[in-house]
């Protein structure tokens, strides 16, 4: 591996350490229905987004709720020893892309057939922090000092 390629790989690895996301692939819901739910939570705080998804009656809300919990778990895995409340997490971006389409046939009058397209989607949910990671570490250290006193 060349030096430029190695440097670029290290930059990407460092960038991924500060990204917190979760992906849901081949979800058997149409992208249009999933985008309705995604629009409800984009830009909101994590706790508020969880409440919104709990009280939304759409089927896509349940899947989005599980995806948000997965993204929170990914954040906790990368930030051990810090609390979610200190980080002020919010839903930074929700991307809903179309995935494979199952093509089925439904019978129609006079020997004809109509095509039915059963759509599915890919969802990527990314979390962001309103506070920089360095500030979070300083806040945690201050709390530990106060507890020790």
Image (spheres, rainbow, N blue to C red):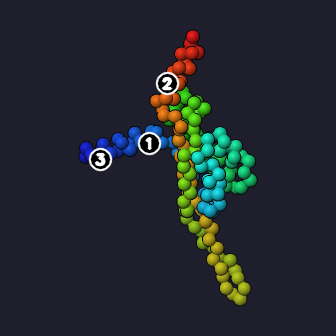
- Between disc 1 and disc 3, whose residue precedes? 3
Marking on residue 16: 1
- Packing grade of label 2 (10 A; few <14, some 14-19, many >=20) is few
| Percent x, y of residue 69 | 62, 42
Judging by the rendered image, the residue that carries numbered circle 2 is: 138
Asked if labels 3 and 2 touch by Cβ distance under 8 angstroms, the answer is no
Pick the quarter of the image with the C terminus.
Answer: top right
- Considering the numbered disc 1 on the image, is that residue within a helix, a strand or a loop? helix
- Between disc 2 and disc 1, whose residue precedes? 1
Q: Residue at x 69, y 87 (%)?
A: 111
Q: Is residue 3 left or right of residue 14?
A: left
Q: Is residue 67 above or below residue 30?
A: above
Real-space Cα separation, disc 2 to disc 3, in angstroms: 34 Å
Real-space Cα separation, disc 2 to disc 1, in angstroms: 22 Å
Judging by the rendered image, the residue that carries numbered circle 3 is: 5
- Between disc 2 and disc 3, whose residue precedes? 3
């Amino acid at each position: 591996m060349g030096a430029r390629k190695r440097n670029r790989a290290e930059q990407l690895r460092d960038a991924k350490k500060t990204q917190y996301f979760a992906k849901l692939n081949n979800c058997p819901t149409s992208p249009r229905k999933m985008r309705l739910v995604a629009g409800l939570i984009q830009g909101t705080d994590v706790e508020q987004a969880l409440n919104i998804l709990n009280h939304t009656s759409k089927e896509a809300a349940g899947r989005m709720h599980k995806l948000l919990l997965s993204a929170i778990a990914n954040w906790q895995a990368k930030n051990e020893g810090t609390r979610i409340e200190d980080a002020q997490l919010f839903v930074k971006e929700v991307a809903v892309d179309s995935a494979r389409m199952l093509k089925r046939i439904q019978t129609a009058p006079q020997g004809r057939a109509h095509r039915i397209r059963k759509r599915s989607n890919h969802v990527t949910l990314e979390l962001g922090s309103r506070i920089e990671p360095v500030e979070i570490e300083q806040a945690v250290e201050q709390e530990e000092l106060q507890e020790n006193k």
